[in-house]
Amino acid sequence: MSAWMWPTVRSISWAPLAGVAACLGGFVALVTDDQLTSSITGIAAATVAAAVVAGTHDPAADLLAASPTSALVRLLRRLLFLGPAGLGVWVATIGGALLGLLVLAVVGVAVSTRAGVTAGVVVPLAWTVLAWATGLDWELR
Amino acid sequence: MTTATAELARLEGRRMLRHPAPWVGVALALLMSWSLWDEAWSGQRYGGLLSATAPLLLGISLASVSAFGRELAPVAAEAPMSREDRSIARLLAGLPLVLVAAVLLTAGAVCVRSIGGLTLGDEPGHTDHAQYTLPELVQPVLLAGFAVAIGAAVVHVVRQRLAAGIVLTLGWFLVGGVAWIFNGPVLRWITPVQVQPVAVRIGDWDADPSTFPESWLLTPPGQYQDYWTRVVVSPAMAAWHDVYLVGVIALTVAVAVPGRTRRPMVLAGAVLAAAGLVMQQVVAP
């Protein structure tokens, strides 16, 4: 195991993904009908994507700015763990098409690199909440 | 209440009122209500208007997360205000947003009354003049209080604002956005957003509707059920659901506010929530 792996795993903020997994897991346990489960595909994809983006938050970014490991490399290393974890949550709870989840996660990460993690988290959530309120077809399949 | 608590409550209250999330929530709630105006089926607007408040409730919760998130910054033990007092002040600061929700709700109720009411039921049991009952109108105001408390409780437990915001977005969508999933038998007593009317089975698909009392509001067999149902709005069930909500708010506040208030809150909350649950079952149509 490379020396960076364990410190990276420990430094990742797992709380958002754990919270989303608990909510979606509880919902799937309570509502066993696949048709009903599919009615929350949009918000499930958005919250899993937002949780992955939130997990990339690096509280020590300023401290590590001068280190040889660049911010981009640290971000990619975090995503190496967060991506499969988010995918696991998705497959274990809602399942179904991955395109919507991937698009929202990629856009969220892209925004977070420019405008900060909070903005990156807001993008997938805002998209879905806006689609919910306006009745848009939000299923990115 | 000490002067310091009142001052912090005023300060945080102003900050919560300036937070953009509740106002974006108001706009989205109005948008959702507007999109319900052309009903696809009779009674869609009656049930949908209540769950359309969910974006506002989410906005209130996010403002609460923002206020209680400041509690995550370490404060010296010798600080002039204890953590309990600070938490109580922040809870009180959420009251203006509850008031905003109450004002909007009153405006909505007046609007419904001015247009002569909403549709419920299908011919031969149909009305165009259904009005919300008082316990139903009280529910969203209590939900606004719950939104403040749950925002505080989640950020207190999760200890991260972003994580709390994501979990609350998902949670409010589940109980508000797809409220119909949680408004079946039993679950409608437990879920925070209880949507009425309730459909009660009264006859098979081949029953003669003229044999039912004229005062009943009816739904014929169709896409979602193969039998006749009576559409019932139960003010008693809504009232006991309000009692249940008060209990849940007390329990949630107990999670958010540490100190000597926790024990009586848990006790009172558990009693009220249990009484509300049992009595909803008793009076359910």
Image: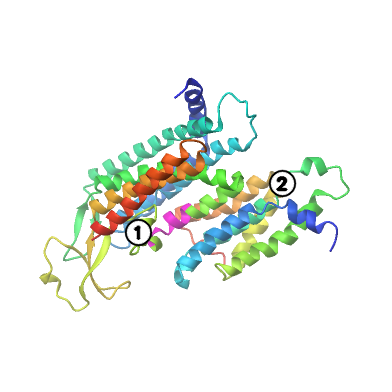
Residue B143 in sight in this render: no
Of B35 and B19, which appears nearest the observer? B19
Instruction: Report the amino acid beneath label 1.
Output: Arg
Is B55 on the left-hand or right-hand side of A97? Answer: left
- Provide residue A49's location: percent of width, then percent of height: 62, 58
Q: Which residues are magenta?
A: B172-180
Label for residue A16? none
The answer to whether residue B194 shows anywhere in this view is: yes
Residue B126 in picture, x, y percent from top left: 19, 61
Q: Which label was assigned to residue B188? A: 1
**Residue at left 43%, top 36%?**
B97
The one of A21 and B5 positioned closer to us in this rendering: B5
For mark 2, what is the residue? A114
- In the picture provided, is B84 more to the left or to the right than B265? right
> Image point 50% across, 62% down: which residue?
A26
| Chain letter of the residue carrying label 2 | A
Q: Position of residue B211 (x, y in %)?
A: 11, 71
Q: Is residue B176 magenta?
A: yes
Could you give the CA–CA distance between mark 1 and mark 2, rounded to whole angstroms? 44 Å
Q: Farthest residue to the top: give it.
A: B3
